[in-house]
Image (spheres, grey):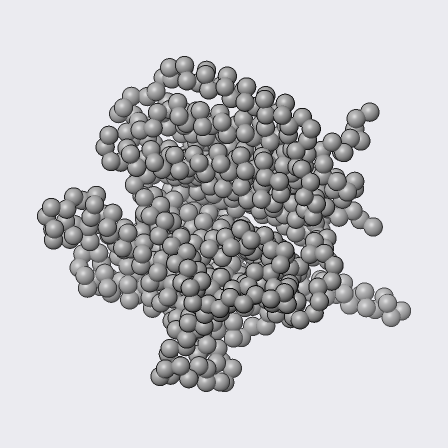
Amino acid sequence: MDAIVSWLTSLFPHMAAPIARLIVHLVYAAILSFVAPVVVVVAFTYMERKVIARIQDRVGPNRAGPLGLLQGFADAVKMLTKEDITPVGADRIVYNLAPGLAVVGTILVYAVLPVAPGVIGADLNIGILYVVAVGGFGMLAAVMAGWSSNNKYALLSAFRVVAQLIAYEIPMVIAIIMVVLAAGSMQMGQIIDAQNVPFLFTLPVAFFIFFVATIAEIGRSPFDLLEAESEIVAGFHVEYSGFKFALFFIGEYMHLFVGAGLGTTLFLGGWRGPGASEATILGVLLGFVYFLVKTVFLIFLMMWVRGTFPRIRIDHLLDFGWKFLVPVGLLALVAVALVLKLPFLSSSVLKWVGMLVANIVVVVVSLTAVSFAARRSRSVALRGVAGTER
Amino acid sequence: MLSDFTFVGILVLIAVLLPVVGLGLSWLIRPKKPNPVKQSTYECGIETIGDTWVQFRAQYYIYALVFVVFDIEAVFLLPWAVAYDQLPLYALTEAVIFVLILALALVYAWRKGALRWS
Amino acid sequence: MPVDQIVKTVVFVIFTVMTLGGGLGVVVSPRIFHSALFLVLSFAGVVGYYVLLDAGFLAAVQLLIYIGAIAILILFAIMLSRGLMAERQSQSNQQWWIAALVALLIFVVLAAVLWRVDWPVASQQALASPSNAISQEGSQLGRDLLGPYVIPFEVASVLLLVALIGAVILARETES
Amino acid sequence: MIPLHWWLIVAAALFCIGLYGVLSRKNAIGVLMGIELMLNAVNVNLVAFWRYITPQVLTGQIFAIFVITVAAAEAAVGLAIIIAAYRRRDTVIVDELDIMRW
């Protein structure tokens, strides 16, 4: 950003630096608010359809344009021309505010996403906390939509959404605290700088928790209970049609991209890679390419998960969050903190190895505990069956 | 500090335009032919029975409770994590005690069946 | 007046409208759900205040705890006690005008007193460079929390534990 | 900078609005929301004093964090009481929750 500002001032010598900064900010904000949603939605709905189709042995979209590439645009036109329906008994103001809040809340997260060396809207020193905090708007939008629709399925779904989001926000925050602990900062730039070895390798437990929690926060399969068609029609946005539905949809895909982008930033080293640097335009572009490749890879993983796993039952979903991810996360947090204070791990390499070992120990311990608990509950259940037979 | 947040402010102002412009555009080109059937509550074609406000379970509230407690824990642990490098050894024990007390809260809720979806 | 001063003042006025307007909405809105949404608006205005006051960390905490957690708790409680939702009766009691009078009176007294006091504002130099909650070089907040404020830090966790236990006991479905 | 007086008066106004809510609402949840507004007003004061009078040390911010913690605990327990009362007595109107009156 600073580089572009100085380039602008050198191009137009009469321009004052604050004005140039303002222009750069406005342009970047416009890109994030208008270009990014279109590109993200069109690209990733297409990718998702193709990937899922491949997994399910189908062809996927192939009518609109060559290879079905224009499918996303066709959908956009359809959404824009659909009639807008407001159900009777709806609370009109709240009903109309909810979709806007959902999409704006998601776009706000992009402000601190470093997409390339030096390209970040605002490198806040509370960066990652800002992400978590802004995430609350999505929850609010769901509650507002569910409440105002005057539909019991929408309302039930809103309850479920919140229950699910809060169950997975805590593990996610714990994973983030682990990253902050290792990086010593909440600022995105410094978190990337700290990853001479990507945190994926030193904090695999945190990555696993973060990845699962991200899928759940976006509400994608197998955690898509909020729109379980067979149970609660289609979720809190069941009554929405036309562009208002499209706004929820855009919000979901924007959330998908930013979730994967944050995973990249926190665990895969962000835009880092050979040749990426802030100094030259080529370096910046390379950094952007690295960022995109890593992010798309994570998104592909999420699609793969979606194509492979069946939907989880709600009690299992909540149990997995509260009774597995949270304790494991707390355990890993304490273990990592312990390793970082061990006196004989003086060099950074030793610390990385130590963190990795601590993570592996946590994995072993928690898996043992789970298998022990499972065996016990199974034997209790068997005893119960035997009891009824007798 | 404040200048860091100017971009966030600008982004809010611009991002709000997305729903506004989109809804305006679709308002111009979409059909408007409301009728009572279309506007009735959607339940897959079945007539709605009873009030929307069927009684919900207090279980949801208990999950929210546990969430609030752990959210605040995060607020306290984040500054700790940032400063951890510069803190002496007792920071570890203090934080462990802190986490343990909260783990106790989780254990309590768990044992009391507050986290059971029955 | 320099430009950034004007911008700051305008932003301050916007946040004030949000905070006080939201607050008024909370206390006069006839539907309790709308009250809760106005409460969120008011909280959001306070988030803006914290940003204006250079307390970025606190702004994020306000957003996270008040909007992300407390507002959600309140909305849940409203949805769970929906008995009052259907009817649109007045939400105020009979002494509302006495309450309004008392509140107004207290405000007038407070404002008069606050306006007259000559607050010992720090020097310009100190004002220009506040110690940020979590600035790049230091991490003062963490050191403070685990230094002079370590007892409140631990007591906070005990408070949370007790609150959780109490609330779980109260809110649990009665066993039958 | 914006004068300190402005902050204090805005906070006082917010406090009094909250007070009005506490005194005039029938619904217990409404009363609780009034209390939250009052606590927010206090926090604005704390942070404003920190920023203008002691910007070198973080005491004001730390107190604000503890106030937020206590507010959250208070809201959690308060709402739990309201839900329990609703379930037992089928009302959340404060005036009707009078079993302790005698």
Question: Residue A344: percent from the left, percent from the top?
Answer: 39, 47
Q: Is residue A246 left or right of residue A26?
A: right
Q: Is residue D52 left or right of residue C34?
A: left
Q: Is residue A157 left or right of residue D43?
A: right
- Quadrant assignment for the C terminus of chain A: bottom right
Count how many numbered circles sit on residues in the image: 0
Question: Residue C143: percent from the left, percent from the top?
Answer: 41, 34
- In this rendered view, identify the residue nearer to me: C143 or A103: A103
Which residue is found at the position 45% from the left and 38% from the top? C18
In this view, the residue farthest toward the right is A390
Residue A284's place in the image compared with B61, above or below, is below
Residue D80's place in the image compared with A288, above or below, is above
Residue A230's place in the image compared with A89, above or below, is below
The answer, for residue C82, to whether it is visible in the render is no
In this view, the residue farthest toward the left is A13
Which residue is found at the position 50% from the left and 50% from the top? A136
Which residue is found at the position 80% from the left and 31% from the top? D99
- In this rendered view, identify the residue nearer to me: D101 or A208: D101
Q: Is residue C107 left or right of residue C138?
A: right
- In this rendered view, identify the residue nearer to me: C29 or A63: C29
Question: Residue A162: percent from the left, percent from the top?
Answer: 58, 54
Question: Residue A389: percent from the left, percent from the top?
Answer: 87, 70
The answer, for residue B15, to whether it is visible in the render is yes
Which residue is found at the position 68% from the left and 46% from the top? C85
- In this rendered view, identify the residue nearer to me: C40 or A192: C40
